[in-house]
């Protein structure tokens, strides 16, 4: 019996096959690159100058003055304080209009302290350089904050970061604040970025929890809000002292496109 031989592939076929493989490899590498980096604002891009203890005391005094038992109002965690207060109000039949009025008054107090902090805030070392380099590498940038929109825009304008940021979501746009994922999901949608192609950079346990809920890689910026021990205990793996370390870390992991050649000096 005569055995048939496999047909010999032409040189043209081999070249086409090699080109197809090369294209698939490039596409696979491209899929592994980051499409977006999302930053927290206070404590991450700018110094955190908000007097949170004083803010909480003022908000707590507001509710106590309206007959809320002090023992039902936490003294730590602004969001915990607000949740407890509004839960108590609903459980004890406070009229919806009263709850809305108290909510508006509580957020007006928060805004007062946020504006005071914004006027004192400074840009953290490496922030502008990191954002500029991400823009140069064609990685999109989002900012997610629990602060109000007015002071957020003021800070970005104050430090001339507006042109380096693609999307900003404050508590005024997000249905729920961090650690709820609403704001982060809104940013991903607007940036058209997948979770596995995004990194979230923040400085607090709230930021870490937000990223974890969406299985997004988190990079902790050590600002003093969360200690290295606390952050690691909650699952943080990557910790950086300043944003100067961000781009070198992403380069080491090969997570962002390499720098494009600078042709400005060509003759």
Image (cartoon, grey):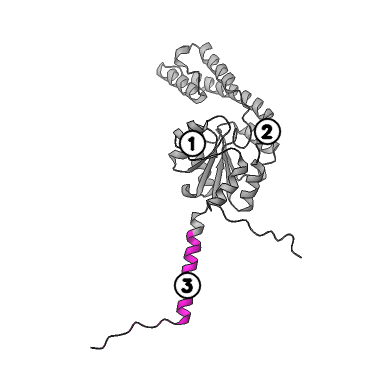
Q: Give me the residue at 57% from left, 43% from top.
A: 142
Q: Secondary structure at mark 1?
A: helix
Residue 233, image x and y in percent?
A: 44, 33
Residue drawn 62% across the image and 24% down it: 113
Sequence-first tag of 1 and 2? 2
Residue interval drawn in magenta = 1-28
Q: Quadrant of residue 116?
A: top right
Residue at position x 65%, y 41% in the image: 126
Label ID, residue 208:
1
Whether residue 71 appears in this view of the structure is yes
Circle 1 packing at 10 Å, graded few (<14), some (14-19), many (20+), is: many
Rendering coords of residue 34 (x, y %): 53, 51
From this view, report whether residue 168 is shown above or below residue 263: above
Residue occupying the far right of the picture: 267
Given contact means CB atoms under 8 Å apart, are the residues at marks 1 and 2 in contact?
no
Q: Quadrant of the N terminus?
A: bottom left
Residue 180 colored in magenta in the image = no
**Is residue 177 at least partly visible in the picture?**
no
Counting from the top left corner in percent of width and height, residue 266 is at 74, 63
The residue that mark 2 highlights is: 122
Q: Secondary structure at mark 2?
A: loop
The residue wearing badge 3 is 18
The x, y position of residue 207, in whole percent, is 51, 35
Label 2–label 3 contact, CB within 8 A: no
User: Residues under labels 3 and 1: Cα distance?
Assistant: 43 Å
Q: State how far apart marks 1 and 2 are (Cα).
A: 23 Å
Sequence order check: which comes first, mark 3 or mark 1? Answer: 3
């Amino acid at each position: 019996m005569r055995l048939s031989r496999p047909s010999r592939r032409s040189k043209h076929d081999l070249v086409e096959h090699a080109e197809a493989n090369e294209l698939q490899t490039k596409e696979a590498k491209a899929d592994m690159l980051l499409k977006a980096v999302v930053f927290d604002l206070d404590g991450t891009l700018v110094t955190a100058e908000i007097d949170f203890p004083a803010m909480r005391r003022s908000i707590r005094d507001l509710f106590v003055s309206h007959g809320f038992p002090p023992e039902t109002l936490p003294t730590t965690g602004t969001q915990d304080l607000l949740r407890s207060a509004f839960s108590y109000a609903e459980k004890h039949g406070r009229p919806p209009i009263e709850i809305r009025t108290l909510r508006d008054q509580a957020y007006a107090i928060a805004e007062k302290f946020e504006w005071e902090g914004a006027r004192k805030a400074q840009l953290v070392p490496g922030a502008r350089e990191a954002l500029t380099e991400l823009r140069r590498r064609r990685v999109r940038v989002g900012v997610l904050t629990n602060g109000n929109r007015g002071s957020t825009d003021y800070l970005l304008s104050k430090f001339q970061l507006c042109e380096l940021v693609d999307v900003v979501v404050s508590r005024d746009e997000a249905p729920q604040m961090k650690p709820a994922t609403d704001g982060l999901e809104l940013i991903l949608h607007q940036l058209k970025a997948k979770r596995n192609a995004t990194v979230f950079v923040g400085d607090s346990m709230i930021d870490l929890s937000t990223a974890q809920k969406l299985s997004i890689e988190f990079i902790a910026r050590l600002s003093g809000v969360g200690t290295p021990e606390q952050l690691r205990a909650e699952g943080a793996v990557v910790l950086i002292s300043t944003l100067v370390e961000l781009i070198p870390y992403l380069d080491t992991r090969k997570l962002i496109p390499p720098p494009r050649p600078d042709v400005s000096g060509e003759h």
